[in-house]
Amino acid sequence: MKIKKGGPGRWIGLAEARAICFDKTPLIDKEEVHIIDCSGRVAFCDMTAIVNSPSVTASLKDGYAVHSSDVAAASRQNPIRLVLSGTSAAGDSGTGPLATGCSARILTGAPLPQVADAVVSQEFVNVQDGFALFTADADPGRNVLVEGADVRIGEIILRRGEIPTPGRIGLLAAAGVSTLPVYRMPRILLIATGDEIVEPGTPLKKGGLYASNLVTLASYSVSRGLHADMRIVSDSPEYLKQAITGANGPYDALCIIGGAWDGDRDFTMSTLDELGWEPYFRRVRMGPGKAVSFGRLGGKPAFSLPGGPPSNHIAFLQLVLPSLLHMGGHMPPYLPLVRATLTEEVSGQEDWTQFIHAKLSSEEGELKVTPLRSKSRLRDMADCDSLIEIPEGKTRIERASIIDVQRIV
């Protein structure tokens, strides 16, 4: 392809490509989900408590509710006897005021009788003939959980843009929240091109290949909460056009794998151009994955990736997946970084960003990262859990350097 000095035909750096992708992939709409389904989703708005939790001042232990002043002098040597008056269990609506000189049997989670201010654990109380004999004191508030101690009405429990953890989801439930508005995760159609590509589960002819690239990228999508569908089309402009046209309805984004160069059977770019897509860039100074293109088709983001396994793998992880997560409200949407010590020297090219598949390990509490250098591209992709990035302008990183590593699993 002839490279232009400006516009979408020029080669651009990875940082510029990322900026373009995020600028052109705006947040999509929201949906309401049950709180049990909101793990990993991004809150669309602030969520506030609509009830107090607990809803009453309650006991933290099985024991006896008292006025703390009535048992202030209680001890084993000086037991205090109080009248036993009633019982309170969890779920009760509450009892009337507790009279001075009286105590009430109370179970864990039960509402504290009015004006009582402490609970004495049952191991310090002996009951006999309608009286309770206390052998320990209790300061005001002992073994008592005050109404609203965990959550108060109107308190913000989850802020817009946050991703709730399981613990936070439990707090939302305690606050009376049953459903949550979240950013909808985008639906993407992944199309693989090639006469030799076969869907897994069907017979494989001589010279054929199962669509492992397609399955890999779909798996990354699903593991991040995205909705991904897969299609395989032969090397035919007409079939590719039909598949692309069919993506306009139910999908929020399109990603085509293969046919990204200018060979005799590379029809992706010409087909997209014929369909009227608006390209933003067509090549990125990164390796593997330089033949990645991005634009808009029918008002929706559309990516084209090279067909080689390392190339589409890296291009997808660096540009496509972060863009899709960005559409679903994730900020920042990049792969998480960890600090690790490099076990071997790595080298790249000065005029682009180089990525290397790698494996993390821990030795004596120190996190280390080792480049994967087998002769099998698919084996390295299967074994790797991280990526080493050699930024543009740098040709090597020395052994024992402490670097930021992208964690992909």
Image: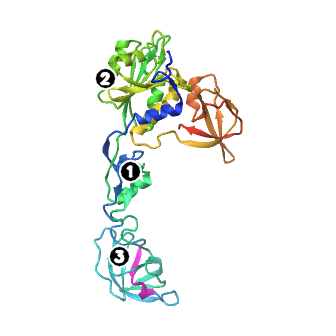
Q: Which residue is mark 1?
A: 160
Q: Residues within 10 Å of mark 1 (few under 14, many from 20)?
A: some
Query: Residue at point 36% right, 67% down?
Result: 54
Which residue carries the number 2 mark?
Answer: 246
Marks 2, 3: nearer the viewer: 2
Q: Residue at x 48, y 13 (%)?
A: 262
Q: Residue furthest top?
A: 264
What amino acid type should be assigned to the residue bearing mark 3? Answer: Leu
Q: Amino acid at mark 1?
A: Arg
Picture coordinates of residue 78, whole percent (x, y): 50, 90
Marks 3 and 1, the one that precedes in the sequence: 3
Looking at the image, residue 34 sits to the left or right of residue 62; the answer is left
Secondary structure found at label 1:
loop
> Mark 2 to mark 3: distance in Å?
64 Å
Q: Relative to residue 296, is residue 57 depicted above or below?
A: below
Who's the residue at 37% across and 27% down the image? 296
**Alpha carbon of mark 1 to alpha carbon of mark 2: how far?**
34 Å
- The stretch in magenta equals 62-71
Q: Earlier in the sequence, mark 1 or mark 2?
A: 1
